[in-house]
Image (tube, helix red, strand yellow):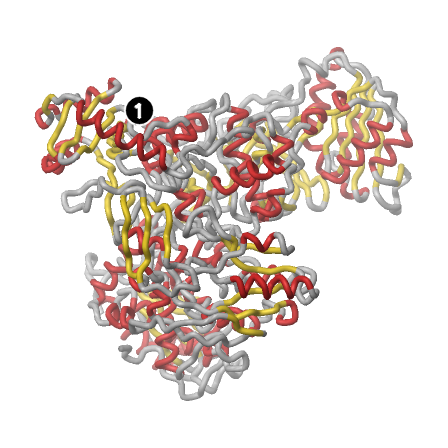
């Protein structure tokens, strides 16, 4: 275990930023999101949850795939360059690290998404353990220990010290690059903090949310439940939940005509949008109920069916905090639980 | 006016109503009144056909100034179209000011079919104004800039 | 609140209405959700407290398509939205039984969190019955107190007034919550230099994630198909590749609701990134008032709407603007 | 293959298309054209299997999934039969021979011509443009005739003018030994002396024995009734294959659009055996 004084963190960031792009939680206009470090950035490591998850470091909200140019009848295609520079995502939480694992299942399965893979190959995750989880958190329900994040480097902010523990080869390489700034430490303070946090976790209302009955084998039973018709009612069909979610991965591919070439880009899309499945001759998910059901069925049934039971939810609680209509996956799970209990 | 090669040549989009201003532009042309070639005219059936999205799209795709020309109030071919356009543009321009887009990048001018001289003068003035404002950097899409 | 439930039960029982549109208690102190209630038993979950900020007028568009009457609870400001929808023939007055509910200012959980409150377990002082000046909040990290006023939604500080403009009956008391000037922030921005204005909005809009929450919650955004969802134009750009797209979206959205926006503040309430979207709408409202005379959307169903009306003597767009 | 300077940092991602050139356009019906596509330097863009699809795109206009209608046994080119029904297809219909478009693929699974279908008696049932994906299989079967039993083709359309590949049907398929072609149109029409009536009812009239494997493609409503008719005739669901069509963007099971249950139609489909479809939630 290594350590660095909190007051020396700017020097650490500076050092990392010399050779790599550094993404970390930055406050802009009163909201904290992951952004690129600059010297005058308002870094906020105390923020428990950034509004958006850091998934866009690997799967950006929009990215150009290639550009087409047409001269007379000839088309030429220039693919976008892949990520070829190392970058560091600093301060990512345990739940969001797991979120990236979920994305890996999608983008790194055959056929591999090379754009995503290049970013994964060049990205170094420095995770920060949670000290003060909140009432909207339920990472424990997915087997995540927010006090012991598994990434390239795990860090803990205890009092005025950041403790630093490399866990992978990539993490060790990064540690070597900044070793001048780090000094040896024992882990007693970290252990102490972990125990404290774990005690809090036990007191949080959602942490022990039971996902019993949700798995890849309950497709028809859950799909046909009359509960969906009730649950979806307040849904406004916006994309807030999908866009703040660390695991939602649906995308759209679109063209942008720049006047000197057509850029084909992909951008996040939401299964909640009415035009998501719209085709020239109809829409197979016509009602908001169907779209609402799709999102939760995908996270809790379809995804586990294809990925050895792994849920496509990590309990970060962003949808709990951000849904304009106060709907969320916890309410869905609880509604089914209640229904099951009543029977 | 001779231009040297490095001088900034603004791109101007002029929406002209079919009945008055487009005819005014025609008259300017046939009377051999000059106006800068940087002005690209888009003919619209009426000034009220221009919705705010047209104006913003023009800026997005690289225009440095956008001007809307229609019949004089009271002379609209469709009786009242330009009155509605007037309110809309008043509000839109005010909003653009509010967002910090330089005043003067947008303009509305009433030009009749007989006002070839006014058309040419207006365009010359407008191009001059945009030239003094310089390139539009605040309301363009970066993807269109290279 | 019990009065509301009782009345709803009566109206359901005597067949006046087929369903009730209200708020259902959430599993936390602050997350009630809009909900339909069809039976007396359903109403056991009904709640109306200071966290019921959601404007139910928009749901009435769908409710108007359902069989029979819907009992809807509208706060004073919500009634303006309903009236505006009525003016635009998007809701059916015959299908609605409106109970105007009192309002003592609605609370904003984000504002409470901003004051350093986290790990919330219980909040007291938010019910309609005990009009407290202080919210007592029990959290995992200790007890906190937050003044009610400081926790209110922005819109409540500049409330239009506590009178309902459309209702069948009114239940409950309101209290005056105004402690700010509605246009002061707009004026502050107007007085900036163009560079400052540009930076201000650039910063705010850079947070936009194009989730469409502002649009979908907006009672004035009632188009069946939004221009930003149409594939026929270049406008269906969901991406935020470039800051232009967000500017475009928010300017056009504000423009499309100009003269129709009742300033209900839902857009700002729901924005996950806390963008003060009302500043766009309020700018249009202020301009309309200044240029064409005072107008409050939703107040008078028969009044001439500013953008579908004109005067021969209207000002010219190029005039120097304040 | 493309004009780009593909060096080390550039990518050969599956989302990056190849350039194809239109080498022939055949007007099949008033609203269907068949486009023959080659690589710009000649030859085929890629190898595919019968039933597979590809993403065809015109930059700046759009991109959509189309089934490849030519048989893999055709060594020279690929063909797409495209019905005019949207922004992209409208544009495609204005294109001319010599113009370029982009193609990526092939995507999805295929009809199991080398496994389950081998040695079987085949019954093709198609409606309208639904013959396009089956044509690939039919021609594959013709080119490997010895591997299959009897072949029946039942094809119907709205009118005589809406029958695609009519020339090929009459001049090639109908003349093959052991292939029976049954045509029908929805309504009486001057100059038509063949059968009149919907495909499902014609199917029942013909009353095939259930010793065949059926491959069905057409509008959803037709598939529904054909399936019912087949069951009535004693076919089991394991004997019926069909293809599904949904909105797709990526073609590789990632973008989430064509997700039905735990399947992605673009990757796990588009060809499904009907008993597999039964396991999917009813959202197609």
Q: What is the x, y in percent for residue A67?
A: 39, 39
Quadrant for residue D142, please give it. Answer: top right
Q: Nearer the viewer, residue D25 or A331?
A: A331
Q: If the image is split into quadrants, where does the C terminus of chain A sit?
A: top right
Q: What is the x, y in percent for residue A199?
A: 31, 31
Quadrant for residue C139, please give it. Answer: top left
What residue is pinned by disc 1? A150
Q: Nearer the viewer, residue D95 or A248?
A: A248
Q: Is residue C217 above or below residue D111?
A: below
Q: How many marks?
A: 1
What's the chain of the residue with tag 1? A
Q: Is residue B146 above or below residue C308?
A: above
Q: If the image is split into quadrants, where does the N terminus of chain A sit?
A: top left
Q: Nearer the viewer, residue B54 or C79?
A: C79
Q: Is residue D275 above or below residue B100?
A: above
Q: Mark yes or no: residue A92 visible.
A: yes
Residue under the image location 60 percent in, 52 percent down: C42
Q: Is residue C190 above or below residue A169?
A: below
Q: What is the x, y in percent for residue A279?
A: 60, 44
Residue under the image location 34 percent in, 46 percent down: C120
Q: What is the x, y in percent for residue C47?
A: 50, 57
Quadrant for residue A335, please give it. Answer: top right
Residue under the image location 14 percent in, 43 percent down: A39
Element at label 1: loop
The reply, left or right, for residue D144 in relation to residue D229 is left
């Amino acid at each position: 275990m290594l350590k660095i004084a909190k007051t020396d963190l700017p020097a650490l960031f500076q050092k990392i930023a010399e050779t790599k792009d550094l993404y970390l939680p930055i406050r802009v206009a009163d909201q904290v999101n992951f952004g690129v470090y600059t010297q005058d950035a308002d870094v906020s490591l105390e923020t428990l949850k950034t509004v958006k998850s850091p998934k866009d470091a690997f799967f950006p909200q929009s990215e150009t795939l290639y550009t087409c140019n047409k001269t007379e009848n000839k088309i030429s295609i220039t693919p976008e360059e892949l990520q070829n520079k190392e970058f560091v995502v600093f301060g990512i939480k345990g739940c969001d690290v797991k979120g990236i694992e979920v994305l890996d299942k999608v983008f790194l399965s055959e056929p591999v998404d090379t754009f995503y893979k290049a970013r994964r190959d060049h990205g170094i995750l420095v995770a920060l353990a949670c000290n003060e989880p909140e009432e909207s958190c339920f990472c424990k329900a997915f087997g995540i220990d927010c006090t012991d994040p598994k990434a390239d480097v795990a860090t803990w902010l205890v009092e005025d010290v950041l403790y630093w523990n490399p866990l992978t080869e990539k993490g060790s390489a990064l540690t070597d690059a900044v070793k001048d700034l780090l000094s040896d430490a024992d882990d007693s303070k970290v252990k102490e903090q972990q125990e404290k946090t774990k005690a809090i976790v036990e007191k949080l209302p959602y942490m022990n949310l039971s996902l019993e009955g949700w798995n890849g084998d309950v497709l028809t039973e859950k799909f046909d439940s009359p509960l969906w018709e009730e649950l979806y009612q307040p849904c406004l069909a916006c994309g807030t939940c999908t866009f703040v979610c660390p695991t939602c991965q649906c995308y759209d591919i679109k063209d942008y005509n720049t006047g000197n070439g057509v850029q084909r880009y992909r951008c996040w899309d939401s299964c909640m949008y009415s035009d998501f499945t719209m085709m020239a001759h109809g829409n197979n998910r016509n009602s908001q109920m169907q779209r609402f059901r799709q999102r939760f069925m995908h996270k809790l049934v379809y995804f586990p069916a294809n990925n050895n039971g792994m849920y496509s939810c990590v309990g970060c609680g962003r949808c709990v905090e951000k849904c304009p209509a106060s709907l969320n996956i916890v309410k869905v799970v609880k509604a089914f639980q209640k229904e099951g209990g009543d029977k | 006016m001779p231009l040297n090669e490095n001088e900034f040549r603004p791109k101007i989009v002029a929406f002209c109503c079919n009945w008055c201003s487009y005819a005014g532009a025609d008259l300017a042309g046939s009377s051999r009144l000059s106006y800068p070639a940087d002005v690209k005219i888009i003919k619209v059936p009426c000034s009220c056909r221009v919705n705010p999205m047209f104006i913003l799209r023009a800026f997005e795709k690289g225009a440095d100034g956008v001007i809307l020309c229609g019949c004089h109030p009271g002379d609209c071919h469709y009786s009242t179209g330009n009155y509605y356009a007037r309110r809309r543009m008043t509000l839109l321009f005010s909003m653009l000011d509010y967002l910090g887009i330089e005043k003067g990048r947008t303009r509305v001018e009433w030009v009749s079919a007989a006002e070839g001289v006014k058309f040419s003068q207006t365009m010359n003035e407008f191009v001059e104004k945009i030239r003094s404002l310089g390139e539009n950097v605040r309301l363009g899409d970066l993807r269109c800039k290279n | 609140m019990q009065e509301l439930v009782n009345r709803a039960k009566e109206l359901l029982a005597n067949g006046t209405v087929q369903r009730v549109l209200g708020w259902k208690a959430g599993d936390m102190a602050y997350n009630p959700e809009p909900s339909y209630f069809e039976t007396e038993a359903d109403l056991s979950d009904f709640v109306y407290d200071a966290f019921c900020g959601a404007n139910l007028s928009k749901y009435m568009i769908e409710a108007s398509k359902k069989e029979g009457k819907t009992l809807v609870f509208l706060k004073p400001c919500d009634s303006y939205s309903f009236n505006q929808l009525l003016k635009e023939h998007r809701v059916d007055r015959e299908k609605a039984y409106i109970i105007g509910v009192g309002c003592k200012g609605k609370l904003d959980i984000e504002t409470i969190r901003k004051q350093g409150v986290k790990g919330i377990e219980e909040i007291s002082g938010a019910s309609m019955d005990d009009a407290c000046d202080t919210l007592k909040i029990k959290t995992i990290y200790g007890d906190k107190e937050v003044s009610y006023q400081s926790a209110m939604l922005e819109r409540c500080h500049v409330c239009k007034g506590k009178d309902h403009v459309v209702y069948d009956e009114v239940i409950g008391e309101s209290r005056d919550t105004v402690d700010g000037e509605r246009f002061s922030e707009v004026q502050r921005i107007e007085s900036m230099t163009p560079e400052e204005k540009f930076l201000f909005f650039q910063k705010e809009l850079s947070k936009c994630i194009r989730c469409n929450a502002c649009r979908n919650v907006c009672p004035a955004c009632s188009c069946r198909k939004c221009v930003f969802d149409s594939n026929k134009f270049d406008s269906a750009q969901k991406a935020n590749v470039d800051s232009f797209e967000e500017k475009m979206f928010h300017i056009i959205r504000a423009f499309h609701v100009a003269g129709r926006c009742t300033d209900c503040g839902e857009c700002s309430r729901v924005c996950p990134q806390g963008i003060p979207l009302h500043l766009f709408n309020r700018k249009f409202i202020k301009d309309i008032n200044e240029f064409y005379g005072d107008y409050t959307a939703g107040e008078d169903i028969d009044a001439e709407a500013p953008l579908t009306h004109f005067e021969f003597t209207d000002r010219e767009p190029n005039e120097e603007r304040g | 293959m493309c004009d780009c300077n593909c060096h080390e940092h550039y990518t050969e991602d599956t989302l990056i298309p190849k350039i194809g050139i239109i080498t022939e356009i055949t007007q099949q019906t008033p609203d269907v054209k068949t486009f023959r596509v080659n690589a710009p330097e000649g030859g085929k863009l890629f190898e595919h299997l019968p039933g597979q699809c590809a993403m065809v795109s015109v930059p700046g206009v759009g991109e959509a999934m189309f089934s490849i209608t030519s048989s893999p046994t055709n060594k020279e080119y690929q063909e797409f039969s495209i019905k005019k029904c949207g922004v992209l297809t409208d544009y495609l219909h204005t294109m001319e021979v010599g113009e370029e478009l982009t193609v990526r693929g092939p995507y999805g699974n295929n009809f199991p011509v080398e496994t389950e279908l081998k040695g079987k008696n085949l019954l093709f049932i198609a409606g309208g443009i639904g013959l396009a994906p089956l044509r690939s299989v039919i021609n594959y079967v013709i080119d490997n005739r010895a591997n299959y039993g009897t072949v029946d083709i039942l094809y119907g359309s709205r009118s005589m003018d809406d029958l695609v590949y009519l020339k090929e049907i009459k001049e090639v398929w109908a003349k093959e030994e052991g292939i029976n072609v049954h045509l029908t149109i929805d309504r009486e029409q001057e100059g038509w002396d063949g059968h009149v009536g919907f495909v499902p009812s014609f199917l029942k009239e013909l009353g095939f024995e259930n010793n065949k494997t059926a491959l069905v493609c057409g509008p959803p409503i037709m598939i529904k009734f054909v399936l019912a008719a087949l069951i009535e005739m004693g076919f089991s669901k394991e004997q019926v294959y069909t293809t599904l069509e949904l909105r797709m963007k990526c073609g590789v099971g990632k973008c989430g659009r064509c997700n039905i249950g735990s399947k992605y139609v673009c990757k796990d489909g588009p060809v499904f055996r009907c008993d597999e479809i039964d396991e999917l939630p009813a959202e197609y």
